[in-house]
Image (tube, rainbow, N blue to C red):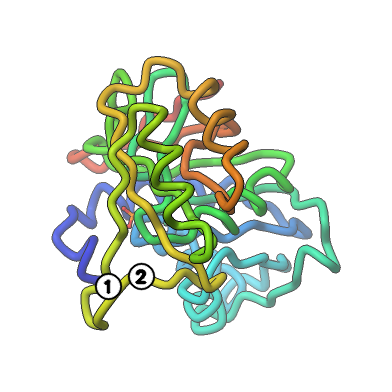
Amino acid sequence: MTERNKSADSAEKRAAGIAASRAVEPGMVVGLGTGSTVAYAIRELGRRVREEGLEILGVVTSYQSEMLAIEAGIPLTTLAQHPELDIAIDGADQIDSNLYAIKGGGAAHTREKIVSISAKRFLVVADESKTSLQLDKAVPVEVLPFAKELVTKKIRNLGGKPELRLALRKDGPVITDNGNFILDSSFCVINDPESLALKLSTIPGVIEHGIFSNVDELYIGKKDGSVEIVKK
Ligand SMILES: O=C(CO)[C@H](O)[C@H](O)COP(=O)(O)O
């Protein structure tokens, strides 16, 4: 488990991850998200592959999910080979009552968005602390390093406060799996996530932002081990 999520309550995350993994059926091509919550789903799918002969193919969203899926024994494929997935499962940093989500705490949101939008059904797994009436966490924005100053200015013009994400065990910025920077951009309460998402997407140099509007089902793990499922 990484620094950013090692203090989180793993019982709630485990309950959500395992419950969502049950939606995966034999023969499916499955998008495998990134982070500590979806890791429980990936490990459980691996167990079913090894112990029950479940036949699935996984499409990973990061080096982290690739390493975990390989360790768990899930056979992998690519979007080039399987452009349409049956289902994708992933975590979130915050999710509101309309199932708009902020993702990218692990700097993997660009591939996560591509994979989840390629799926017929997108399930998000989270503990209760991630749910909120409205989104107010900083939005991770993956930026081409060449465009950092321009994107910083444009985000400020939209009322945001962009901060370059710095690495913990490396000097300088976090470099994403795609070789880019992350600007964590606070907009306080986001009243209209669709509108902000569109505005961020049109800034030249923005690779992808962490506002997701394609969540179909939310699995919320509770302290008592139960899981609430919210559908769109
Ligand atoms: O978007 C993500 C990575 O970019 C993660 O899914 C998100 O940060 C949630 O992670 P965790 O389940 O560890 O809290």
Ligand 1 quadrant?
Answer: bottom left
Task: Say what secondary structure mark 2 lies in.
Answer: loop
Identify residue for label 2.
Answer: 174
Looking at the picture, does residue 200 appear above or below residue 51?
Answer: above
Residue extending farthest right? 81
Identify residue for label 1.
Answer: 167
Determine crowd level at label 1: few under 14, some 14-19, many 20+ residues with C-alpha closer than 10 A. Answer: few
Q: Amino acid at mark 1?
A: Ala
Q: CB under 8 Å between callouts 1 and 2?
A: yes
Looking at the picture, does residue 148 appear above or below residue 124?
Answer: below
Name the quadrant of the C terminus. top right
Q: Amino acid at mark 2?
A: Val
Residue 187: x %, y % from top left: 31, 30
Q: CA distance from mark 1 to mark 2?
A: 5 Å
Task: Say what secondary structure mark 1 lies in.
Answer: loop
Query: From where the camera sits, is residue 18 visible?
Result: no
Q: Residue at x 42, y 72 (%)?
A: 175
Query: From where the camera sits, is residue 73 visible?
Result: yes
Looking at the picture, does residue 57 appear above or below residue 150?
Answer: below
Residue 25: x %, y % from top left: 69, 52
**Left/right of residue 58 with respect to residue 109 in the rendered view:** right
- How many marks are shown on the rendered structure? 2
Residue extending farthest top? 191
Q: Which mark is residue 56?
A: none
The answer to which of 14 and 103 lies nearer the viewer is 103
Of callouts 1 and 2, the N-terminal one: 1
Q: Can you tell me whether the CB of the residue at mark 1 lies under 8 Å from the nearest atom of ligand 1?
A: no
Q: Can you tell me whether the CB of the residue at mark 2 lies under 8 Å from the nearest atom of ligand 1?
A: no
Q: Residue at x 62, y 36 (%)?
A: 202
**Left/right of residue 31 with respect to residue 152 in the rendered view:** right
